[in-house]
Image (tube, grey):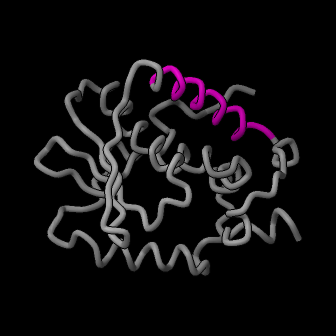
Amino acid sequence: MISEYSTKNISGMMIYYYFVCKRKLWYFCHQVSMEQNNENVKLGKILDESSYIRENKHIEIDGTINIDFIHDYKVLHEVKKSRKIEEAGIWQVKYYLYYLKQRGVEGIEGIIDYPLLKRNIKVILNNEDEAVLESVIEHIKRIIDGQISSINNEKKNICKSCAYYDLCFI
């Protein structure tokens, strides 16, 4: 089966979930939503609503990526509540930079902001990252087209706080 997803259809959240948990990615892509009542998701929404209130937030591009905010037309910001899954956030921002570059927008920097920690990290995209992202995009398409049963059900430290925990382990 050939995936109906093109790079245009791969969202930043899909990239993020790919690095967090491939089963969560599959559930998300198949509209299995368990997050509406999850405490961590609620806290994230409160953080989103109360942080960076002067910025023009939630910049959606092509109906595919949703950037938290862009400062001075050249610095893309993603807001996270903790560094617990930092690698996934870094790849999400790299994907935003990659996505924009594919559409002719260059010279933009990426930053992940942690307002509760009063910290941020700079994210850059290089040629090696682009190759990794292209591979990740293809793997995401295969995950979406596959069956949930074919995805390893590896238990991680973050699983206990995941909205999908019951689907995976109970």
Q: Main secondary structure of the magenta part?
A: helix
Residue drawn 31% across and 27% down? 101
Q: Which residue is pictured at 61% across the width and 81% down the height?
A: 37
Which image quarter: residue 136? top right
Where is residue 117? Give x, y as percent.
37, 69
Q: Quadrant of the rendered structure where residue 104 is?
A: top left
Q: Is residue 161 left or right of residue 70?
A: right
Left or right: 46 in relation to 35: left
Report the front residue among 158 and 9: 158
Give the magenta part as a residue range: 130-146
Q: If the image is split into quadrants, where does the N terminus sit?
A: top right
- Relative to 132, residue 65 above or below: below
Say if the magenta span includes residue 163: no
Question: From the viewer's perspective, is residue 117 above or below residue 141?
Answer: below
Query: x, y percentage for residue 116?
Result: 37, 73
Residue at 55%, 46% in the rendered image: 14
Question: Where is 20 relative to 34, above or below?
Answer: above
What x and y, as percent, mark residue 128?
A: 47, 20
Identify which residue is drawn at 52% across, 46% down: 87
Q: Is residue 142 magenta?
A: yes
